[in-house]
Amino acid sequence: MQVNIVLERRKTINVVEAILSWSSMKLLNESQKLSTSKVYQLISDTLTEFPFERMVTYFCKRLNVSQSDYYSYLKASDARAVGEQKDLEARDLILKAFNHRGYKERLTFY
């Protein structure tokens, strides 16, 4: 009975270690080419996909980014979404005015 419990716990630990290894390697590889905000987004996505407790510190240390800045990034996500929505509305208004004047729609916004 005790042996089965130990074996089950060892399996669970191995699975968690494999996921952590994969996640951290993915983050390390991708973060070398990315801005800090993209690294924070990767950490957030990874922790959403694999909801581990207390892993923010681990990922931030591995990726050499500030943990407090990561939390500030998360806190400001609503403000970024609002700003992006305003930018899209402004783009639509500019295109509407541009098309109203009879110009061909040659502008493309991404």
Image: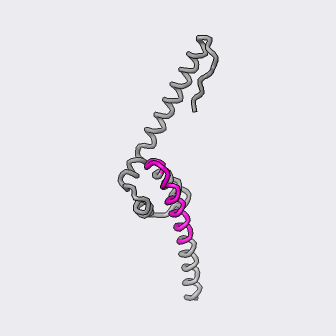
Instruction: Check residue 34 for magenta coloring.
Output: yes
Frontmost residue, 35 versus 16: 35
Place residue 80 in its image quadrant: top left
Up-down: is 81 above or below 7?
above
Rendered-image quadrant of the C terminus: top right
What span is in magenta?
17-38
Up-down: is 81 above or below 31?
above
Frontmost residue, 58 versus 29: 29
Q: Residue at x 43, y 64 (%)?
A: 58
Q: Is residue 94 left or right of residue 76?
A: right
Up-down: is 105 above or below 102?
below
Q: Is residue 37 left or right of residue 16?
A: left
Rendered-image quadrant of the N terminus: bottom right
Q: Residue at x 53, y 75 (%)?
A: 13
Q: Position of residue 57 (x, y in %)?
A: 40, 62
Q: Position of residue 42 (x, y in %)?
A: 51, 53
Q: Position of residue 99 (x, y in %)?
A: 61, 16
Q: Residue at x 56, y 57 (%)?
A: 49
Q: Is residue 101 left or right of residue 37?
A: right
Q: Residue at x 48, y 50 (%)?
A: 34
Q: Is residue 110 left or right of residue 75?
A: right
Q: Position of residue 71 (x, y in %)?
A: 39, 51
